[in-house]
Image: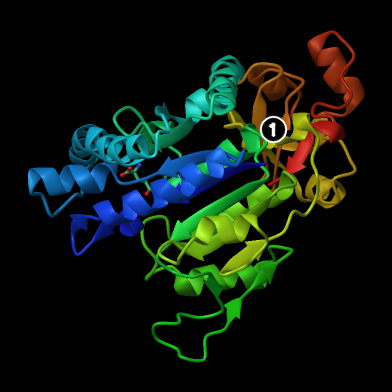
Amino acid sequence: MRVVVKIGTSTLTKSGKIDTEYIKGISEEVAGLVRNGKEIVIVSSGAIGFGAMKSGIKDTRGIVKRQSLAAIGQIILMKEYEKAFSVQGIDIAQILLTYDVLSNRKSYLNLKNCMEMLLKNKVVPIINENDVVSIDEIGTAFGDNDVMSALVSTKIDADLLIILSDIDGLYDDNPKKNSDARKIKVVSKIDNEIESYAGKAGSFFSVGGMKSKIRAASIVMKSGSTMAIAEGREKKVISRIIEGENPGTIFLPSEKLNARKRWILAAKPKGKISINECAIEIMKDGKSSLLPVGVVNVEGNFSQGDVVKIGSFAKGISLLSASEMRKVKGLKSKEASAALGRKVSEIVRRDDIVPC
Ligand code: GLU
């Protein structure tokens, strides 16, 4: 069984300090699981927080400041894990990722081969975002480790993603303000109602917040795996979830996408195709291809074969380059074929479209 465990900064710290005891405890638990044949990958935040503690900085706002704090804190974070895991006789490995690396098929395959070898040798890979080089503004950042851990899970075919947080699951209202707030134990579909709970809760959850956890869940569910959110400080929480207990909220797999669709789902789109109402209506059920006549606008500079965003509801592999797509937008297939001098019918095949 392959499990990804995401640990947030607030779980790794206590009263503004690194919680060494917690890290020792989690390492002991993970080491036990690895000895029992489980493959465990940790996605750990904490670089910026630990860097800020070391530098005595309270206000961590500002891109360059956060980047340098992450550079300082990442080694402190790994040193803590190294200390704790070496007592257990288990080796760890550091992997720093950007959205680009995961979206590029070649670098992704390099990563996957390396991860497979580490896991085969009972090493625990510890992943964080490479905050020093990835920033939102240039589109290389995941934004938060919730979404990154979901993409990593999808890409390495994990059976389960466990997000350890400072809250013990998804609630229908803020449990700190409303004592009647109800915990949602099982989610089998992410609908407007579930999304609205994340909105209400947004302000009091740490780092990525519940919204990004729901985004992560939607990626994991669509790829045919399970995700759990649980309070990170509960005793033996990882082992209990692996054994089938549900101390928090469990998100069940909705469908098993094939490897190609999983790839599309996790890829970073190279451009965006806006489509008209009529095309939206026809394509909503996921059973129709995209034709040139439905396209109203083309953004970005993608090549044939790149993943593009389609409207606001799907991603797909484009059969045309961005410049070809601009030439044929809005045209009927016959006119589009004349414009490009070759037969053009569908421009994104229905089998290459994944709602997201
Ligand atoms: N990568 C950041 C860090 O290690 C945290 C991002 C997050 O917590 O979602 O500090």
Label 1 SS: helix
Q: Quadrant of the N terminus?
A: top right
Observer-nearest residue: 82 or 51? 82
Rendering quadrant holding ligand 1? top left
Residue 147 visible from this viewpoint: no
Q: From what the image shows, is residue 299 above or below residue 23?
A: above
Number of numbered labels in the structure image = 1
Residue at 42 percent of width and 55 percent of height: 208
Task: Spot the residue most to the bottom.
Answer: 180
Residue 115 visible from this viewpoint: yes
Q: Position of residue 65 (x, y in %)?
A: 18, 39
Q: From what the image shows, is residue 229 above or below residue 4?
A: below
Task: Spot the residue most to the top.
Answer: 341
| Relative side of 213 to 226, left or right | left
Observer-nearest residue: 312 or 297? 312
Tell me which amino acid carries mark 1: Ile
Q: Locate residue 73: give its quadrant.
A: top left
Residue at 60 percent of width and 24 percent of height: 116
| Relative side of 276 to 55, left or right | right
Q: Locate residue 348: give its quadrant.
A: top right
Q: Position of residue 286 (x, y in %)?
A: 84, 45
Residue at 36 percent of width and 38 percent of height: 85
Q: Position of residue 67 (x, y in %)?
A: 24, 35
Task: Judge: label 1 CB < 8 Å from ligand 1.
Answer: no
Graded by Cα atoms within 10 Å as few (under 14), some (14 to 19) or many (20 or more), the crowding at tag 1 reads many
Q: Which residue is mark 1?
A: 264
Residue at 78 percent of width and 49 percent of height: 280
